[in-house]
Image (tube, rainbow, N blue to C red):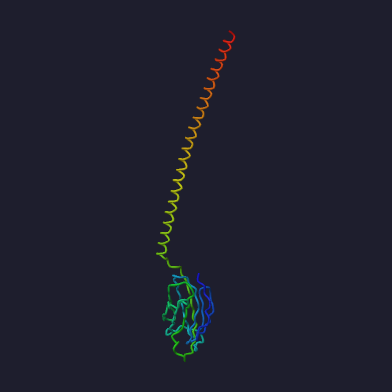
Amino acid sequence: MARRRLSHPLPVLFLLFIVASANALHFYLDANEKRCFLEEVPSDTVVEGHYRALEWNEAEQKYLDNPNLGILVEVDELETGHNVVRTRGPPDGRFTFTSHDSGDHAVCLSSNYGTNWFTKTHIRLYLDIVVGSTKPDREHDRTHVSELSSKLRDLNQKLEDVRREQQYQREREANFRDLSEITNARAVWYVVAQVVVLIITCAWQLRHLKKFFEDRKI
């Protein structure tokens, strides 16, 4: 949201206005005066302004419409000094501009009596500023989408690497399990063979001892 604030006094320019609402204001100026205020605007943002000027009528003692009254609108970027708008319009008109850079913009208004130093008329000027949404940056959007696509590809590649690693670990686990089962089976058969050999050895020794004692008895 744009932030509106008063500008500092400009050379030979007097600055005085009354804020009427958050987005609208009205102020007074003489025929040879220019009034300015600052509007902080983001970059690439559309700003629309609507103004209405009433001129003081001495006969009726009030401010009235004057079709011959013209309003000069000037908008400058303070940081770069770039003039964004310079247009002269009727007493009731509009102006639109798109900010090129973010920052303070000086919006100045004056009447077409500015070159006549002998004119003493007074003007009441209403001004309403509407700061629109930022213009879509399609190039930035495409770049952002490309970056997202690249990140998604990298993420998919990493997920594929993780899947392959998990598959490799499962295969290693299966191989280790098979090797463990084979080793356990061989160990069992080795124990069985040892038991068989031990039984055969015991039987042979018993038979040999029996024969020895039989021979000694005789």
Q: Outermost residue, right direction?
A: 217
Q: Outermost residue, bottom direction?
A: 118
Residue at image x 43%, y 67%? 135
Q: Outermost residue, top direction?
A: 218
Question: Can you give x and y, in whole percent of width and height, for residue 12 in the image?
Answer: 50, 86
Residue at image x 50%, y 77%? 38
Question: Can you give x and y, in whole percent of width and height, for residue 69 in the image?
Answer: 44, 84
Question: Can you give x and y, in whole percent of width and height, for residue 211 in the image?
Answer: 55, 12
Q: How many tags in the picture? A: 0
Query: Based on the displayed image, in which of its 4 quarters is residue 218 positioned?
Result: top right
Foreground pick, 14 / 143: 143
Question: Can you give x and y, in whole percent of width and height, for residue 182 in the image?
Answer: 48, 32
Query: Based on the displayed image, in which of its 4 quarters is residue 215 positioned?
Result: top right
Residue 129 to residue 12: above or below: above
Foreground pick, 31 / 201: 201
Residue at image x 50%, y 71%? 2
Q: Is 10 left, or right, of 143 in this rendering?
A: right
